[in-house]
Image (cartoon, helix red, strand yellow):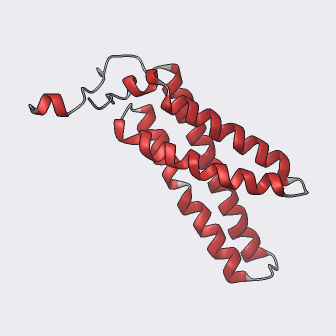
Amino acid sequence: MSSTEQTPAAPSPSAPRPARVTAAAAVAGLEALALFAGGVYLLVTGITGRPDDLTQALTGGATLVALGVLPLLAARGLLLCRSWSRGPAIVTQLMALPVAWTLLQASSAAIPAGIALAAAAVTGLVLLVHPATTRALGIRPRA
C-alpha cells in the first residue's frame, strides 16, 4: 500500500468549510465556554465566599477550567478542518451525556441546564458523525 493510500487527502485550503463543521465547532466552543465559566465561578466563590470545603471548591474550579481546554482545542481544530479534531470533539460530547443525565435527575434549577447540555451533546454528536463532516475533515472510511 502506498503512503498516499494510507493518508487521507486533506481538504483543499481554498475549499469552503461546510456549515455542519462550523456548527460542530460552535457547539464545542460553547461547551468550552460553559466549562470555563463554571470553573471561574467555583474559583471565585471559593476564594471570596465561605465554601463548606475550600480545597474542594478550588480543586473543582481548577478541574473545570482544565476540562474546558479539550473542547476549546477541538473547536479550533474543527474551524481549521483538521482531521484530528473530530476525536476530541466526540469525546467531549460523550462526556457531556452522563453529566446531563445527572443534572436531569436533580429536583432543582439544574434540570434546564441538563436539558440544554443533553441537546448540545446530541446535536454535536450528530454533526460530528455525519458523512459530510467526515469528508470535510479528510477522514475516509477504512477499506
Q: Quadrant of the C terminus?
A: top left
Single out the residue that lies furthest toward the top: 15
Is 58 above or below relative to 111?
below
Of residue 135 and residue 28, the one placed in the foreground of this image is: 135
Residue at 75 percent across and 83 percent down: it is 53
| Quarter-of-image position of residue 105 | bottom right
| Relative horizontal placement of residue 129, taking residue 103 as reference (left or right) | left
Residue at 72 percent across and 76 percent down: it is 47
* Residue 85: % across, % down: 41, 41
Is 77 above or below relative to 105?
above
Is 120 above or below relative to 113?
above
Of residue 40 and residue 139, the one placed in the foreground of this image is: 139
| Relative horizontal placement of residue 11, taking residue 95 as reference (left or right) | left
Q: Quadrant of the N terminus?
A: top left
Single out the residue that lies furthest toward the front: 143
* Residue 136: % across, % down: 39, 23
Q: Is any atom of residue 20 visible in this view?
A: yes
